[in-house]
Amino acid sequence: MAYHKSAEKRHRQTTKRNARNTTLKSEVRSAIKAARAAAEADPATAAAAIKLAQVELARAGTKGVFHKRAVARRIGRLQLLANKAARGELKADTHHKHHGKPAKGAAKAKTAKPAKK
């Protein structure tokens, strides 16, 4: 527990900031997830969802929740996604981090094993 007035104030401020940052991060993650899903499902309505996610990211950047370069990078990636969706170049697994690897839970092609004798 804090003993000094300044330490008590710092604790109050940290608690408030933590609550605000957690909420904003969650909103940004949800908006990005919705934008990616919209881009895969219906490219016609994807632009609005992607724009909303970009606005949420920018707001979080101005509040200091994310670093400004991280915000710029994420907005740029969303814009690339929007462009691909507009051209109709999206695949089913575009948002998976590991390039070329199937997403978790994706069905694997089973190869036939030779019969035992």
Image (cartoon, rainbow, N blue to C red):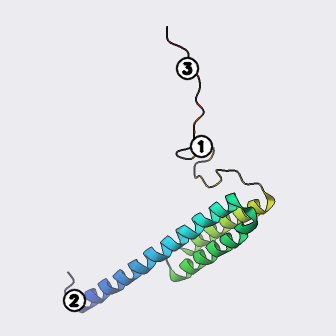
Residue that numbered label 2 is attached to: 4
Give yes or no for contact between labels 2 and 3 (Cβ–Cβ under 8 Å): no
Q: Nearer the viewer, residue 107 or 13?
A: 107
Q: Nearer the viewer, mark 1 or mark 3?
A: 3
Q: Which residue type does callout 2 highlight?
A: His
Q: Residue at the spot x=59%, y=72% of the render?
A: 71
SS for callout 1: loop
Rendered location of residue 84, percent (x, y): 75, 59
In the picture, the disc for residue 113 is 3
Up the image or down, 25 lies above or below 43; here it is below
List x then y, in percent, for residue 14: 35, 81
- Give left or right: position of 88 versus 8: right
- C-alpha separation, residue under disc 2 versus residue under disc 1: 54 Å
State the residue lying farthest toward the bottom: 5
Left or right for 24, reference 18: right
Question: Residue at the spot x=51%, y=82% of the render?
Answer: 63
Q: Earlier in the sequence, mark 2 or mark 3?
A: 2
Q: Is residue 84 left or right of residue 75?
A: right
Label 1 neighbour load within 10 Å: few <14, some 14-19, many 20+:
few
The numbered dot on residue 101 is 1
Q: Is 103 situated left or right of 26 in this image?
A: right
**In this view, 67 is above or below 89:** below
Disc 3 residue type (three-letter): Lys
In depth, the one of 46 and 79 nearer the eye is 46
